[in-house]
Amino acid sequence: MNRVLAAEAVSNFGSMLSGLALPLVAALQLQATPAQMASLLVADVLAAALGGLWLAGWIDRHGRRAAMWIADAARAVLFVLLALALWRGWASMVLLLAVAALSGLATAAFELARSVWMAQRVPADQLARRNAQLSMVGSLSETAAFAIGGWLYQALGAALALLLDACSYLASALCLKGVPEARGGAEPAAGSAWRALLDDTRAGLRAIAAHRSLSAIAVIEVLLGASMALTGSAYMIHVGRDVAIAAGPIGVITALGAIGSLIGAAAAERLGAAIGPGRTMTIGLLAFAAGAACIPMAQQAGWLAIGWLVAHQIVGDAGHTLHAVHDRTLRQTAAAPALLARVDAGLRAAGQGAMLIGAGLAALLGSVASARTLLVVAAALAGGAGLLAAATLARPR
């Protein structure tokens, strides 16, 4: 398990670097328009949502460690080729969109395979603790990537920074050496690739619909996806332009989210054991909503506004991690072993689809509503997710 945690840390570091490097290349090297910048996010999320559904059946039938290794190798090759294209002057937005989509697909495959591997190889009574550790290493690697990624890009240039990104994926693959394989147990796919995709998607959705907790998680994923899309679309406009917080403090405030994530991960196992995973997930979601509600409370530059924004990062991220640890554990234990990846992919697709819809709504509503109004709606959606969890997951069976 320690090797998988190390692979997760390095792989997540690479994913965060990729998420920073691709927009920087688009904005600085290719002079991308706002619509082109948005298309990078759409390509990543759409490929992860649809591709995850397609790959989930394959992961359920084959080796999970092999799937993680292939995903790491594929991302390493992608970013080596992109670095070469930049060095030779061949880069274009079309190439960047293709890399964003394929990288999003490979990342989805890695995360699906890692989750299923844990469900098979980790005893059920240790899953919450291991998922909390996973959240901790993910938070630390994300903070490190954001803290140094821009400086790496500035110091090394785009091509060398992308080569370093590729090396992080190779390091993740090396961490998986010696990890015991977990074989798939699902039935072989029948018919054409399209028929297999439809059958696999239907099997995952049927399993979600048949399980009360998984059905609730699906709706919660939709609410959270829409909430985070609205927040992501309006945050910088509200904080940087309307409240007029400078870029430097914004970066420091954002980095403090790691403290909240670590608090949530540290408390997740004990709180779950004390009051139950459903109630812990509910508390986490309500804390996430409370954190989201802090953002529109910041209305004028100054220490009070900074205090509200810091509260958002610490309270909101702690709550999100509390929920995420037990959400992941519930997915791993509620689904039938042969359907684990397909159920997880269906739940992820619901959230990612809601994110795309939420981003589209933000673009439409942005012309008639203020950024602060969008942030209030985002907090209300997160609160709705918490109330739904209270009514379904937190109630005794």
Image (tube, grey):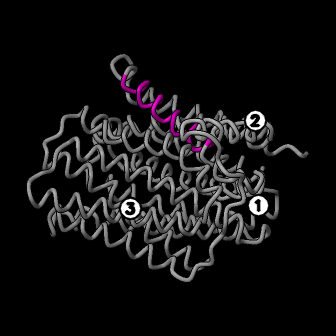
Q: What residue type is labelled 3?
A: Ala
> Height in image: 295 above or below 82?
above
In the displayed structure image, the side of residue 233 where residue 156 appears, left or right: left
Q: What residue type is labelled 2?
A: Ala
Residue 389 in view, yes or no: no
Residue most toward the right? Answer: 397
Q: Nearer the viewer, residue 300 or 239?
A: 239
Which quadrant: the C terminus?
Answer: top right
Residue at 77% of width from left, 52% of height from top?
A: 336
Report the mark closest to the observer, 1 or 3: 3
Q: What element carries label 2?
A: helix
Percent coordinates x, y for residue 364 in the rendering = 38, 20
Mark pair 1, 3: CA separation: 37 Å
In the image, which residues are magenta? Answer: 346-363
Q: Which amino acid does label 1 sit on?
A: Gly
Q: Mark 1 points at which residue?
A: 272
Mark pair 1, 2: CA separation: 25 Å
Q: What element carries label 1?
A: helix
> Height in image: 303 above or below 230?
below
Mark pair 3, 2: CA separation: 33 Å
Mark 2, residues whose alpha carbon is within 10 Å: few (<14), some, or many (≥20)? few
Residue at 61% of width from left, 52% of height from top?
A: 319
Quadrant of the rendered image containing residue 203:
top right
Whichever of labels 3 and 2 marks the residue nearer the N terminus, that label is 3
Q: Mark 2 points at which residue?
A: 209
Circle number at residue 74: 3
